[in-house]
Amino acid sequence: MPNLKEVRIRISSIISTQQITSAMKMVSAAKLRRAQDAIILMRPFEAKLKEILDNLILSAGSSAGVFAKTRPAEKVIIAVITSNRGLCGGFNSNVIKAVNQLVRDKYAEQAKKGNVSFACIGKKGSDFYKRNNAKIFASRNELWDKLTYDNVAEFAGEILKLYAEGKVDRVELVYNKFKNAATQIICADQLLPFSAEASVDKAKSAAPKEGIGKPDYIFEPDKEEIIQSLIPYALKVRVYRSMLDSYAAEHGARMTAMHKATDNAGEILKSLKLTYNKARQAAITKEILEIVGGAEAINN
């Protein structure tokens, strides 16, 4: 049985840890509220933008331009969205596992040739791929310090430019999608080439028939020019929305992890206090026995 001093030191350490995890839980809960509001407001905007773009492509009857141009996937960039900090359960490890699985299942041949690069947003993903000597296209951990559309659009614009110049054939986006505080969904979306076929088919089925009820819009400038300017903007918004999703999911995961850590610390404290009381009682009993034994020896 451990001595009383060792148990007291451990109890003090656990209490300090419990205070830290409880404080981190409250901080993440406050940040989660703001992040959740941001993503809830962003999703309808992105959905409406996509709807407008799909309707334009449908009515114009033309392709989506250079960003929809499909080429053999020889050179691939995978954008990996993780966090800069840990203590959020399996949040980061799940993204890394999904990226590695994506490479094995879809881009094994390109990886053997060294044609798979990683665009890391978040220190955890960047550190992992640096340790594994992977080919890193960019490491933009500072985007989390000030998460704004302008900063994200600049990063996304670099990737769009490479695709437009034909230096990249495929761009994938892997991140945690926020569902609720306790649940994050791993998403692996193809960012480029831009694909509107499925949404156009849906728009066709939902569009009003020829004649009464079908709106007749006048576009200025023409539809083609609007489509060419909207697609890059829509792709940048998509990356920004993915980062907002990941930001909210991170704080949800950290809040849940710190809540569980606080509860576990409480359970350990109960066990340690029971051990402490047993050790203390044993020490008291031993002292009493020594006193009684000494008194009997004197009397005899």
Image (spheres, rainbow, N blue to C red):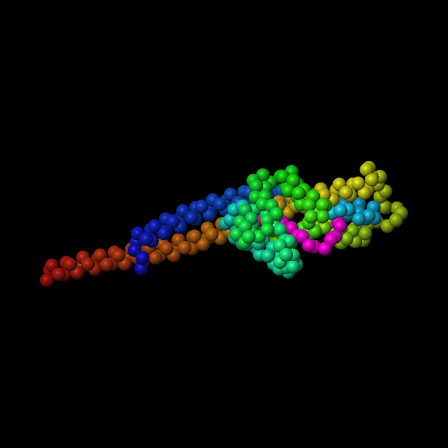
* Image quarter of residue 157: top right
Given residues 242 and 210, the one toward you in this image is 242
Q: x%, y% of residue 172?
A: 66, 52
Residue pictured at 88% horizontal, 46% vertical? 212
User: Is 157 situated left or right of 66 in this image?
Assistant: left
User: Is 269 situated left or right of 169 in this image?
Assistant: left
Which image quarter is the N terminus in?
A: bottom left
Q: x%, y% of residue 23?
A: 47, 44
User: Is 45 situated left or right of 282 in this image?
Assistant: right
Residue pictured at 23% horizontal, 59% vertical? 286
Relative height, residue 272 to residue 221 (above, below) = below
Q: Is 71 contained in the magenta span?
A: yes
Q: Residue furthest front?
A: 113
Q: x%, y% of residue 290?
A: 19, 58
Q: Residue furthest bottom?
A: 300
Q: Is residue 177 visible?
A: no
Q: Is residue 12 visible?
A: yes
Q: Residue furthest right?
A: 211
Q: Is 222 contained in the magenta span?
A: no
Which image quarter is the C terminus in?
A: bottom left
Residue pictured at 73% horizontal, 53% vertical? 71
Segment colored magenta: 68-83
Residue pictured at 18% horizontal, 57% vertical? 291
Given residues 243 and 274, the one toward you in this image is 243
Q: x%, y% of residue 106?
A: 66, 59
